[in-house]
Every structure is written in C-alpha cells, then in structure tokens.
Image (cartoon, grey):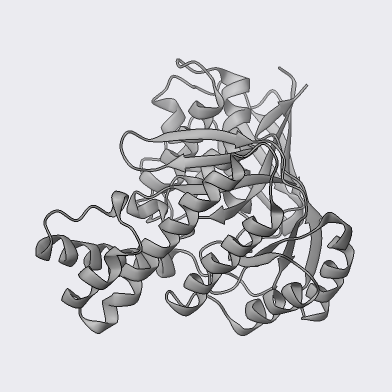
Amino acid sequence: MTEIISLAPGRICLFGDHQDYLGLPVIACAINRNIKLTAVQNGTKIFKLNMIDIDEVRSIDINDTFAKLEPRDYFASALRVLRRHGCIPNVGYNITITGNIPINSGISSSSALLLAWINFLVTAFGVDDEVTPEFISQIGYASEILEHGEPGGMMDHYSIGLGNIVHIDTKSPFSCTVIGSGLNGLITGVSGIPKETIGLIGELKGNALLAIDIVQQNFPDFDLNTAEIEDLDRHRNCLPDHLIPYFEAAVINYDCTKKALKELEKPVLDLKKIGELMNKHHEVLRDLLKITVPRIDAMINAALKAGAYGAKIVGSGGGGSIVAIADPDKEEQIVQAILAAEAVEAYPVSVDSGARIIE
C-alpha cells in the first residue's frame, strides 16, 4: 500500500488502577482523543518519522534489527517483536504523526502511538499470525513492557486495541471482554503536571506484592482473587505498619471493580451509582496509595462541587489527569469548574471503537 492511515485512541482507567500488575481485573475504556499516523511509501530503505506535536524527526533503517534497545524506544522494540512474527519491512515510508492526546498525562499517549505504529507495520508488511485486535494488543504489550522489562500491565494495550469499555482479567488465563460501547457524561481534566510512571509503579507494585506475600505466609489459604472486604481485619495484623495501606488498597479497589462490573453490565446504566464507586476508588488511591497531588485533588473537588456524580485520578499518579462522570446536561459547568481549579485542559469525551486503519 502506498499510503496507510493508522489511528489509535487514548484510554482512561475507570476502575482498577494499580490492580493489573497484581493479577486483578481492570475496567477501562478507549476515548475519542487519538494519535494519527499517516504513512506514504517513499521508495527508500528508511522510515522517516515526523512527530509534529513534539517537533521531532527520526530516521530508522528498515533493516535495523535493534540488537540493543534504548530505554522506552518503542518504535524499535515493536520492530524487533514483529520481526519474530514474520513482519519484515522491505520499503521505507515518510510518516507524519499528529495527535490530540495530552502527552504524559495518564491518558496513554505513548501506548496509543505504539499501537498506531504496530497497526501500520502489520498493514504495510504483513505478519504470520491472524491479525485481530487481540493480536495488535498483545504485540503492544510485548513491545512496551516485556521487551523493555518495565513494570506496567496490559490495560493500556488492550483497552486501546479493542476499544469500547473492556473488563480485563489479568490473572491466568488472561481474558479481555468488551462490556459496553457507550458511557454518557464522561469528562476528563488535564492537570498539566507530568505523571510519574516507571518509578511510582515499581514502588507501589513492590510494596503490594510484598504485603500479599507476607499475608500468604501467615494465612496459606489466602487468595487475593477471592478476597473480600471482611478479610481485612483478619489479615492486616500480620503486616508491618508501612505495608498495611498497600494490602488494604488491593482488597478495597478490587471490591470497587467487582461492584462496578455489575453496574456496567446492566442494560440501563445508573451513572450516579457508577460515580459513587468511582469516588470510593479514588479515596483509596488518594489516602492509601497517596498517588495524587494538590492540583489533582482540587480538580476533583471542583468537579464534585459542580455536580459530578464521581471523579478520580487517571493513570499511574503523581500528576496526570482526572475523569469525572455526570449527568450529560451538566458537562459544561463541570468542565468550567475543572478549568477554574487550574486544569490546563478539560473536555467531555466519548467511548472510542479502538485502534484501526482508516480506509
């Protein structure tokens, strides 16, 4: 193909932040903010990438096998992974990349760019496997997390790859199920404070896994996947004080996610109930895992005061964005309230259909 247009959306985690690396489920959705990759065959042996939004140009030799990866070089790692699946580039492209996903804001601009890149490569050069949204998602996960040895989970890649609202069960055997295609009244607000991903996830994951391991040593019958809120009193006493919040957060967040799944599977959605669960989830992220910052807290408080049913931080934390849910008739007043709380951007969003090639 001489021209290929590949589009991939951002995503928001509705429930289950800091859960997927513990083998617990996540509910997320793709949103209608996207990365667009337009590739035109150039007859050379070079991919020339023009990343307009960050004013950066990069050239990649199509024959480079990237024996050594630079940190977070997902263009290279995707090429390396796809080669193992029979995707062998044989001609270069001039590639223009634009987007309206705020960068480093917890809405997964980097994973969206990665999946747009993977979809382009698979479309341009083929692959030995059957090409499905699940395949594109798995290649994304392998390219970003496994190939670089990073501590993240699968949520970003599968929610972007499959689109819609998905329930991702991260324990073995892994499954990702589309549970809905629409959710009214969603609003995102961008703090302008860069999120902190790699170090923060690594620290929280390490502490949570250590806490769970200690509980299992003391209570061999304990299984996080069947844990209930009532289990907290019985099990927390075996933990040192500094690990108790991580154990409590895992159990309470899991409870919120299970209840949210039941609500989201109903034929008529109760936005107020979903919002209440969102608030409970955020309280855990704020008070136990302590991943918020003052501006995020102010934006959430402003959204709730303006009439939102619920609001929470999005992404790994330390900055980034929020998502709120409200009566659609109140979207504009909530957007203005979030902006007044010093957000750099705020806007209603809708659920997107996922990464795709534009014909």
Percent across and percent down for residue 273 are 64, 57
Displayed quadrant of residue 299: bottom right
Percent across and percent down for residue 169 are 42, 41
Percent across and percent down for residue 323 are 68, 62
Q: Nearer the viewer, residue 311 or 148?
A: 311
Displayed quadrant of residue 124: top right
Number of marks in the rendered image: 0
Q: Quadrant of the C terminus?
A: top right
Q: Nearer the viewer, residue 59 or 4?
A: 4
Name the residue: 79% across, 70% down: 307
Percent across and percent down for residue 96 are 75, 41
Residue 193 appears in view: yes
Name the residue: 64% across, 75% down: 193
Residue 117 appears in view: no
Name the residue: 51% across, 70% down: 196
From the viewer's perspective, is residue 30 above or below residue 292? above
Q: Nearer the viewer, residue 55 or 117?
A: 117
From the viewer's perspective, is residue 243 above or below residue 326? below
Displayed quadrant of residue 122: top right
From the viewer's perspective, is residue 324 above or below residue 130? below
Q: Nearer the viewer, residue 74 or 324?
A: 324
Q: Quadrant of the N terminus?
A: top right
Position of 107 with respect to 54 (left or right) is left
Position of 171 with respect to 274 (left or right) is left
Name the residue: 70% across, 41% down: 268
